[in-house]
Structure formats: structure tokens, C-alpha cells
Amino acid sequence: MDDLSDITITRRSLLIAGALTATSAAMPLSADAQTPATAPSSPPPSMTKFSFDVNGKRQMLEVDTRTTLLDALREHLHLTGTKKGCDHGQCGACTVIVDGRRINSCLTLAVMHDGGKITTIEGLGTPAKLHPMQAAFVKHDGYQCGYCTPGQICSAVAALDEIKQGIPSHVSPDLNVKPLLSAEELRERMSGNICRCGAYSNIIDAITEVAGGTA
């Protein structure tokens, strides 16, 4: 009996000791015992200076080399007409015209356009003197919420210039037909600009009027 009693006490002691060990391991260390982890130091941003022509005015900037053209226009030059939509080049809200071609400004770095010529929605017209495309959008109600409108208008202006140059689209049936203007052509050329409100038919009407066609 004495031996069995000793064994029982020993097992109980082991269980108690194990529970105390688990509890102490789960408790946080005291403030004095804690050693703060050293945060990894990030390298300073690489800055660069460059200049480009924006809406007919020479602009000098010094920005992080990772700055997109969209952020340079909005955050550094405060030209907030160009909108940040998806920020992945899928919606077209950030469309601007660079050296005569429309691009998604969220997909290109600002430093890549050193010496370039950039036109944003602010450079197309003013409230007192609208660009014909802006006036047509107003006339045909080519917008609802208006968020995509700056990109739509910039893209439409550039698309008509492409048609004028005879540049075909994926749906151009005959490259000898000039101008390459039809509702199908315009829809294809404007397919990179998404209108969440669905004002597509009005947008086509506005572009067609400016083009002088009957699409």
C-alpha cells in the first residue's frame, strides 16, 4: 500500500507540474524581459528630376522613380480631372493623350515621358470654351455619374484622330474605305473605356456628331 500511495502522489505531482509549465509558457513576458525586434530599415526612395509639357505648359518635377503618370498628374500637378479608377489599366478612367496617342496613365511611369507632350481633360477645353467633344457629350447626355467621362472624352478625341489617319481597328472590314467610321468601329475603338452607368449609345452619338458621320 505504501508503494502504491507513493506512485499516485508522484503522478499527481507530474500532472500539476505539467499544467504549471504550460501556463507559464502562455503568459507574456514582462516588459523588462521583452526585447523589441529591430524593424528592417527600408532604403530611401530613388528620386529623379524631369520635365514635360502638360496642356501647353512646361512642368518640372522631382518624384520617386516609381511614381505613375497618373499620380504625377493628380498628386503633384493637382490635375484631378484625370480619374483613378481600377488602377490596373482595365477601366480607362485615367486615359490621357501623350504625344498624340491615348494611354492609360496608371500603367506608365512619369519618368518615361521626360520631354513628352501630355494633354489631359483640363487641356482640351475650358468651361467658357468647351472642346467640340465636350460639348457633344453635354448635348447627347454622354455621361451620368461622370466619373469615366474625362477618360471617355480623351479617348474619343484620340480615336477620331486615329480614324483620320486611316489607322484600322480589329473590326475594320475594308482598309480602303475612308473614313473608317461606323457604330461598330466606334464601339471597338472605345472598348477600353468602361461606363459603369451604361451611357454607351449616347457616347457613340456624341462621337459621331463630332466626326460628322452617320454612325
Image (cartoon, helix red, strand yellow):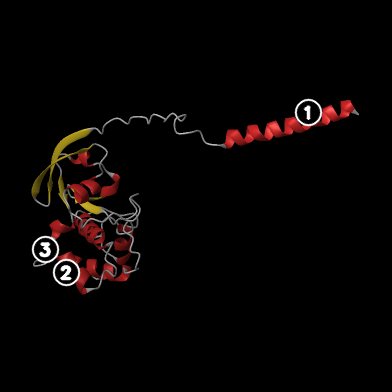
Q: Crowding near pointer 1: few (<14 within 10 Å), some, many (20+)?
A: few
Task: Kindly identify the residue that appears in the image at 33 percent across and 60 percent down.
Answer: 194
Q: Nearer the viewer, mark 3 or mark 2?
A: 3
Which residue reaches farthest right? 1
Pinpoint residue 1: horizontal percent, then vertical percent: 91, 29
Q: CA distance from mark 3 to mark 1?
A: 91 Å
Q: Earlier in the sequence, mark 2 or mark 1?
A: 1
Q: Quadrant of the C terminus?
A: bottom left
Residue underneath mark 2: 135
Q: Which residue is mark 1?
A: 10
Say which amino acid is labelled 1: Thr
Residue 140 position (above or below residue 84): below
Circle 2 Cα neighbour tier, 10 Å, few/some/many (<14 / 14–19 / ≥20)? some
Q: Position of residue 28 (x, y in %)?
A: 52, 36
Element under label 1?
helix
Dot 3 and dot 2 residues touching (CB under 8 Å): no
SS of the residue under disc 3: loop
